[in-house]
């Protein structure tokens, strides 16, 4: 049945989430408690909360009571043995293992701030994020310990490294490193910290065009938005088997891979294995997944294998599918319908917004290629870039803007309040993406308003890549842009001018690629390097990435009057 | 060829301490176990193309084809045979 959007605007308000979660204004509020203990207290402790499948096919299941006891175990050791205090920052640097999901809740129960880090980050990417937030402790595993140890030499505030899978036969732990086996520590009780709706909770770093990554600071009260959007957009109920394919190193993996679905009491599936279409279909079939939240890059990779592998499986459990990370192209939406008999519902939001902002809602006609309409509890529009005035003319491109406040909006950038305030214009929060709105109120994505590279749904800052490139002994000048890619939307392309004595070669290209991959992450690795005599810059030394991008796309390069042509 | 590819993977995709702890042979899952992700696969593909002077089309560079050194050898040998034909 088609939904009446205007009726939804009247019915869906943040108050609904507050009421359903039993929140009383001014009372303590803790995400860890809301996602776990609340369900146990309601008599739902035996309900399955997590089905975890490792890459070897081993399956582990956890009820809400398991989550409660094990997160209490984490909270006890963090508070009692590691001496973590409220507002300390604690990092999670783990593969998608159960300790990541349950440790996340345990950290929040202590009142500390949890900072998840993508497990493929290299040493420099780790240091940039952990140094900025002055992290006190990090939870990691054997296979990432080497990177953490190297980073630690540059992190004076890091007191403790907690290793979840240390074994006696392996390498000896050093001073400041402790072993913690989650499954050996269950506690029925823990005095959850007195946090409130405005208490800091999760710190997610995100990349911009200039400078180091910025830490978007979220609060415990974000749950009202994550709960309501999970319920209304993802259509999750407490009877669903839900699979979010995102890694909790990124915001989708926490907002909708931990907080939203568990606040609703759903059962989550986690697959800790690299991508393969067959394995993904097997996961849906085997675990009877009902709601699936994935990403355009993954959908386009599935498309490569056609619809036959889908048809060979029993996918009848699936009833709702959503997508996030980058615009979902019309072909992918249509392919999804052909393969599964369901529409992928595209959703738009970002690290800073904490929850879905513009979306296709269940029951709303899907226009393939459109981002959908604003989440009904929000006001969103497109505005003139210079004035912030809303654009009323259908089809005219402007900047996507959201009217603050909403519960999950970031409260600041860590150590960077000035940049936080620069995100607002004429009373609107400016997302940094361009779109137009059609006569029926649907948003259509047009591109980023800056040089940030969106690769496989992850934002990568060109400045970080250029800085890493400059540390390579052969590189004198560097620039990085996003090059269009049929699967990943964009991939990183670098332009490099060499130092005297170095000659361009395939060997050198490969060496530079791997250098950046190890320093930052595989996402930041240039997939193509073009050797140039010089990188175009303004006379004041600013890299003219738009000139490189225009050349790459075969477009006019525009005004180059400021270019240094010495 | 097998030893060279194994050595390259060990040196480039595992850090020193990780390499000590990881059992790596021609049948160790690389992509599905997370040792190499789909982005890093691009640099491994580039290495193979450079080393063996072949060109692997993108549509053949699938996670399945790169999941073990054994499957990589099949791919590389097929292209070497094509080149020699």
Image: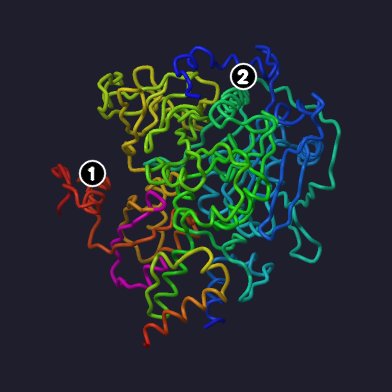
Please identify the residue farthest to the bottom as the structure is shown.
B84
Q: Secondary structure at mark 2?
A: helix
Q: Residues within 10 Å of mark 1 (few under 14, many from 20)?
A: few
Magenta span includes A384: no
Circle 1/circle 2 CB separation < 8 Å: no
Magenta span includes A497: yes
Q: Secondary structure at mark 1?
A: loop
Q: Which residue is rendered at x = 69% and y = 32% of the image?
A: A239
Q: Is residue B78 left or right of residue B3?
A: left
Q: Which residues are magenta?
A: A487-512
Give whichever of A472, A457 is nearer the camera: A457
Q: Which residue is mark 1?
A: A540
Q: Which residue is mark 2?
A: A17
What x and y, as percent, mark residue A566? 15, 54
What x and y, as percent, mark residue A151? 58, 53
The chain letter for the residue carrying disc 1 is A
Q: Is residue A343 left or right of residue A45?
A: left
Image vertical order of residue A84 relative to residue A156, above or below: above
Q: Which residue is rendered at x = 81% and y = 32% of the image?
A: A45
What x and y, as percent, mark residue A374? 43, 24
Q: How many marks on residues? A: 2
Q: Earlier in the sequence, mark 1 or mark 2?
A: 2
Image vertical order of residue A463 relative to residue A365, above or below: below
Can you tell which of label 1 and label 2 is closer to the viewer?
2
């Amino acid at each position: 049945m088609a939904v009446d959007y205007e009726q939804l605007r009247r019915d869906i308000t943040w108050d609904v989430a507050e009421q359903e979660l039993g929140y009383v204004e001014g009372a303590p509020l803790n995400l860890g408690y809301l996602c776990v203990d609340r369900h146990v207290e309601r008599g739902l402790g035996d309900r399955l909360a997590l089905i975890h499948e490792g890459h070897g096919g081993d399956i582990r299941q956890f009820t809400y009571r398991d989550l409660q006891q094990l997160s209490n175990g984490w909270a006890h050791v963090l508070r009692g043995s590691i001496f973590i205090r409220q507002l300390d920052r604690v990092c999670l640097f783990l593969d998608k293992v159960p300790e990541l999901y349950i440790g996340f809740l345990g950290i929040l129960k202590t009142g500390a701030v949890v900072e998840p880090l993508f497990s493929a980050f290299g040493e420099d990417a780790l240091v940039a994020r952990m140094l900025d937030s002055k992290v006190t402790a990090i939870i990691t595993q054997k296979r990432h310990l080497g990177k953490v140890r190297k980073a630690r030499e540059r992190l004076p505030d890091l007191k403790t490294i907690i290793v979840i899978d240390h074994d006696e036969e392996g390498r000896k732990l050093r001073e400041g490193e402790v072993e913690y086996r989650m499954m050996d520590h269950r506690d029925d009780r823990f005095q959850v910290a007195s946090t409130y709706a405005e208490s800091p909770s999760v710190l997610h770093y995100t990349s911009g065009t200039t400078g180091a990554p910025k830490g978007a600071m979220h609060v415990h009260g974000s749950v009202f938005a994550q709960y309501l959007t999970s319920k209304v957009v993802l259509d999750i109920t407490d009877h669903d088997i839900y699979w979010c394919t995102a890694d909790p190193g990124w915001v989708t993996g926490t907002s909708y891979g931990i907080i939203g679905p568990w606040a609703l009491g759903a059962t989550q599936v986690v697959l800790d294995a690299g991508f393969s279409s067959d394995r993904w279909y097997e996961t849906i079939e085997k675990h009877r997944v009902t709601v699936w939240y994935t990403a355009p890059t993954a959908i386009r990779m599935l498309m490569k294998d056609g619809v036959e592998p889908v048809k060979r499986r029993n996918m009848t459990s699936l009833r709702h599918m959503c997508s996030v990370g980058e615009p979902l192209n019309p072909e992918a939406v249509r392919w999804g319908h052909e393969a599964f008999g369901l529409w992928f519902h595209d959703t738009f939001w970002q690290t800073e917004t904490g929850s879905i902002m513009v979306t296709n809602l269940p029951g709303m006609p899907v226009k393939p290629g459109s981002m959908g309409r604003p989440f009904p509890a929000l006001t969103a529009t497109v505005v003139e870039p210079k004035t912030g005035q809303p654009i009323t003319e259908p089809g005219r491109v402007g900047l996507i803007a959201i009217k603050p406040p909403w519960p999950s909006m970031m409260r600041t950038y860590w150590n960077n309040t000035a940049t936080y305030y620069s995100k607002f214009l004429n009373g609107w929060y400016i997302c940094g993406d361009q779109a137009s709105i059609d006569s029926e109120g649907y948003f259509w994505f047009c591109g980023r308003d800056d040089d940030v590279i969106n690769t496989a749904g992850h934002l990568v800052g060109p400045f970080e890549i250029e800085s890493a490139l400059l540390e390579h002994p052969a590189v004198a000048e560097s620039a990085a842009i996003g090059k269009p890619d049929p699967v990943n939307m964009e991939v990183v392309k670098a332009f490099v001018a060499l130092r005297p004595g170095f000659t361009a070669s395939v060997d050198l290209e490969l060496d530079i690629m791997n250098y950046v991959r190890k320093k930052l992450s595989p996402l930041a690795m240039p997939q193509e390097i073009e050797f140039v005599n010089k990188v175009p810059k303004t006379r004041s030394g600013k890299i003219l990435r738009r000139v490189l991008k225009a050349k790459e796309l075969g477009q006019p390069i525009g005004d180059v009057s400021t270019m240094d042509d010495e | 060829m097998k030893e060279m590819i194994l050595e390259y993977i060990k040196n480039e995709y595992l850090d020193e301490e990780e390499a000590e702890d990881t059992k790596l042979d021609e049948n160790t899952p690389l992509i599905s176990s997370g040792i190499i992700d789909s982005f890093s696969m691009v640099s491994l593909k580039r290495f193979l193309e450079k080393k063996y002077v072949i060109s692997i089309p993108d549509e053949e560079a699938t996670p399945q084809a790169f999941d073990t050194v054994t499957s990589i050898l099949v791919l590389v040998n097929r292209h070497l045979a094509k080149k020699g034909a």
